[in-house]
Amino acid sequence: MNWLKSLSKTVFCCLSLFITNVNAQKTLQEYKTAYPDYSEVILNDNKSYDISIENKGIKIIQDNHYESIILKEIGINKNEESFTYSNLVKLLEYDAYTIINDNGKERKIKVTQTNEKQAQESSVFHNDVKERQLIFPNLEAGAKKVYDYQTQFIDYHLLHKFIFGGFAPIENSTLEIKLDKEIDLGYKIFNDPNNTIEFSKTEKRGKWIYKWSMKNIKPVKFEDNSPGYLHIVPNINVFIKNYTIENKKVEGLENVSTLFDYYMDFIKDINKKENAELKTISQNITSNCKTDEEKVKNIFYWVKDNIKYIAFENGYEGFIPREGNLVYERKFGDCKDMASIITTMAKYANIDNVFIAWIGTREIPYLYLDLPTPSVDNHMIAVFKNGEQYVFLDATDNQTRFGIPTSFIQGKEALVNENGTYKIVKVPIVDSEMNKVSEKTNLTIAGNKLIGSSKLELNGYNRSTVLHQIRDASNKARFDLVKNIVLKGNNKFNLKNYTEENITDKDKPYVINYNFELDNYLIKVDKEIFVNLFLDRNIEKLIIEKDRKSKYEIDYLTMSDAAYELDIPQNYKVKYLPKNVSIDNNLFSSNFSYEEKNNKIILKAKFNLKKILLDVTDFELWNETIKKLKSNYSETIILTQK
């Protein structure tokens, strides 16, 4: 390794000197003038791969260089940078330092404060990623943060993306790949409709050199409800399609079939040993079932209730499910382990059509046919093929009922292993009616108060979302959580008491029955009472900013059906009822109707959301619809004394 160390240090040194000389052409004041709104600018974000054939295999060394300059004193607060690595992308070495101006000369101050920790990832499927934190000393306006690190990819299938963009402006960003001519490189560019990424392919010393670069990259504005940065930022995924050794072609990742073969190597030897105890449980909980669907449902719920979800992987364990028997013994596992034990139990119950499948969550925009690499996937589930229908069994969410997928894989493609052959199956977007919220509220007027009793029913994702919020809270903590869920009217809302139904029965709606008082909500003027029966107005807060750039993602489609019945007080009559209103377009449908019946005023308010991902072209219609709804919500009933 000594020769490698010497060579890599030389590479680091030369690269750093080259970058420094280029950027020395600008003064601090010139950077401030060019970027008046920013406290820091990234001067260079560069990655270089050297891919070669050695010992009848692929060797990949990656060199990384990062350099930024502090423009304002506030920028010194961001004195930390970090990079990641793992057992499959091994860290070989790194170097980091601050460059300051010392009497007109640049002086390096080495980073000595570093820390390795487990990387925090939002994915439910990841490997043992470590994060190296670097704390840069002596930062001031004009100082530069520089770090270089070198990694080696143990498995060439895991070559991944390069992203052109970040939270700060970037002057120069480059991806360069040098590879032997016997290696066929594939790549796919995303989110660059105007071809702003410059590309070149040259030959040097018997190697192909691919180079992609962008300059003067504006900062990415990560907006609320964005589908994820991979949907927005220009990025490149590179992969090895095949390579030739001794005149023999070796397949890499040429198509979906080769990706499936790669995955199958990880699962071909699992779940071959029988566990008598788990087999007995599997048969007992399915013994009274008349159909395979009933059996799978019982197994699915048993896993949800008895196996705790914990995300943890180490090396190739990020791809290899643990034995179902081991998951049973441990009583915990990650997403792959959940899929493993579900398929194991199904086999014990003599069900042959429950399979393991790979899938990406909604934050990943790629399709298998566009990018047949592991970059498409970050999750694993079980799938039940019921006739020609597919039921997606993701036990990582212990509240989602049988028959609907978890919300974060809606609309995604699953790569299903059907007895050794693959099939790409699209997960449906769950219809809004399955996530229906129903509520009936009875209201009476007592002085200046509204007295109410209500029954709230939550189905589908609305049910699971609320129960995830409440979890196992008890006493006052649970009371406060329930109050926040049923809150109505204004901040004078007073929840008197409540009861719950179907907390553990996933097939039934979660129900809250509650009584409340709402003070200072009515307006009384002389002989008239003014009251607005719309006690829930959350949707009117969903106006989208005019300058929004990214699509607007909604967790799931939903439907609400609310009925408010107000007893007309004695000696009062209705002076004014608002008109009935209907709205129906590609995004929403809603209907509000008022009726006077049996000495009551009845408002029925129905709302249906139709689209889960809004394009920028939808924003104008969305905002117009929200404004119309807000206008309808503002309508007031007038009661007057007889």
Image (spheres, rainbow, N blue to C red):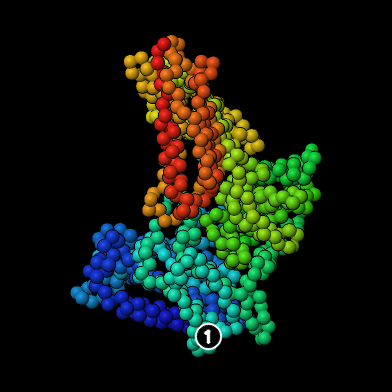
**Which residue is pictured at 47% across the width and 28% down the height?**
579
**Which residue is pictured at 66% across the width and 69% down the height?**
258
Could one spot residue 287 in this view of the protein? no
Q: Quadrant of residue 256?
A: bottom right
Locate residue 137 relative to residue 255 in the image: left or right. Answer: left
Q: Quadrant of residue 188?
A: bottom right
Q: Position of residue 574 (x, y in %)?
A: 44, 18
Q: Position of residue 164 (x, y in %)?
A: 43, 67
The number of numbered discs placed on residues in the rendered structure image is 1
Locate residue 134 relative to residue 469 in the image: left or right. Answer: left
Residue holding disc 1: 207
Could you say whether the residue bearing mark 1 is in a helix, strand or loop?
strand
Image height check: is 270 above or below 439? below
Q: Position of residue 522 (x, y in %)?
A: 38, 22
Locate residue 276 relative to residue 188 in the image: left or right. Answer: right
Label 1 sits on what residue type?
Answer: Lys
